[in-house]
Image (tube, rainbow, N blue to C red):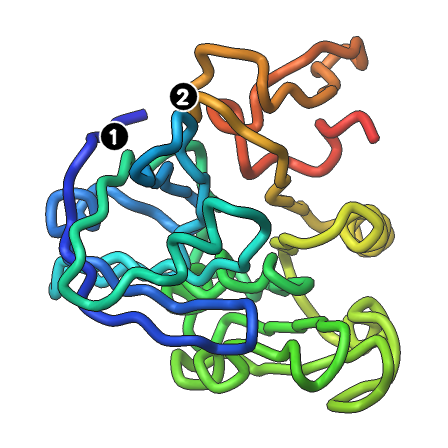
Amino acid sequence: MKYDSKTCKLLSARALTKDVFDFVLEAPELAALANPGQFAQIRLPGHTLRRPISVCGIDKQAGTLRFVFQIRGEGTAELAQFQPGSQIEILAPLGNGFPVDPTRRTLLVGGGIGVPPLLGVAAQLGEKAIAVLGFRNKDAVILEEDFPKVGAKTFIATDDGSYGHHGLVTDLCQDQEFDCVMACGPAPMLKAVQALAEERGVPCYISLEERMACGIGACLGCAVALKGEDGAQYFGHVCKDGPVFESHRVAW
């Protein structure tokens, strides 16, 4: 895993919803190394621990990284106040991303703030991507236009039916044909997606979210129970071994 620490210029910053923000950073060296599904650790003044945020978009030609994040506490609330021109120190790219295969028709299933990491996958797959995105309600919908822009067939579901399909993302997955599944979102959704993939007999990769400290596997802040090839359970690191795992390896 190759990563580096750089101080990067914030090129653009905008609010997508009342608590979700979209940042683009000038980071040519890091963009050259990054792959969809990886993340960055962002340092904030006055805070000991960095904030882990998934990479949403990678433009290697322009030398930029895009991050879409939700305010979850004091640190991300402060980050949301940064304005274009600000300098932000980031450690990236970290972790193992999604194994994108442009020959496979891939179902991308995202829930809430788990949607942004899948956009980079869709950008590489183009018309081979089917994106099924779930949100609480209409006001929480993000990146709806971004997925079709890169060629992905896109469906939206909301819990309350205020926009798109009224129900679960897995409802919309049933009628789709695919060779592989990649997902990011809340654990109940990931378990349901794993069951669907097993039913279809296709590989499934899921991105897990855990609280992190170091971000490079040196501590146990993001320990997760995993299963080895022999079925024995052990603990791994979401930051170093993941955040993307083959779903059958996760000991739910």
On screen, 197 above or below 221? below
Badge 2 element: loop
Return the residue nearer the eye: 59 or 21.
21
Residue in the picture at 55% in, 38% down: 244
Q: Is residue 159 left or right of residue 123?
A: right
First in sequence: mark 2 vs mark 1: 1
Residue 133 in the image: x percent, y percent?
A: 66, 72
Return the residue nearer the eye: 177 or 193.
193
On screen, 202 above or below 94? below
Distance from the alpha carbon under mark 2 to that under mark 1: 10 Å
Residue in the picture at 60% in, 60% down: 113
On screen, 28 above or below 23? above
Whether residues under marks 2 and 1 lie with C-beta atoms below 8 angstroms apart, the answer is yes
Q: Quadrant of the N terminus?
A: top left
Specify whether residue 109 is in view: no
Q: Quadrant of the C terminus?
A: top right
Residue 152 in the image: x percent, y percent?
A: 50, 78
- Residue behind mark 1: 3
Residue 77 in the image: x percent, y percent?
A: 48, 55
Q: Is residue 29 left or right of residue 157?
A: left
Mark 1: few/some/many CA within 10 Å (<14, 14-19, 20+): some
Return the residue nearer the eye: 226 or 213.
213
Specify whether residue 24 is in view: yes
Residue 172 in the image: x percent, y percent?
A: 79, 77
Please state which amino acid type lies under the numbered disc 2: Ile
Q: Is residue 30 left or right of residue 92?
A: left
- Of all residues, the one furthest to the front in this rendering is 46
Instruction: Place residue 243 in its image quadrant.
Output: top right
- Residue behind mark 2: 216
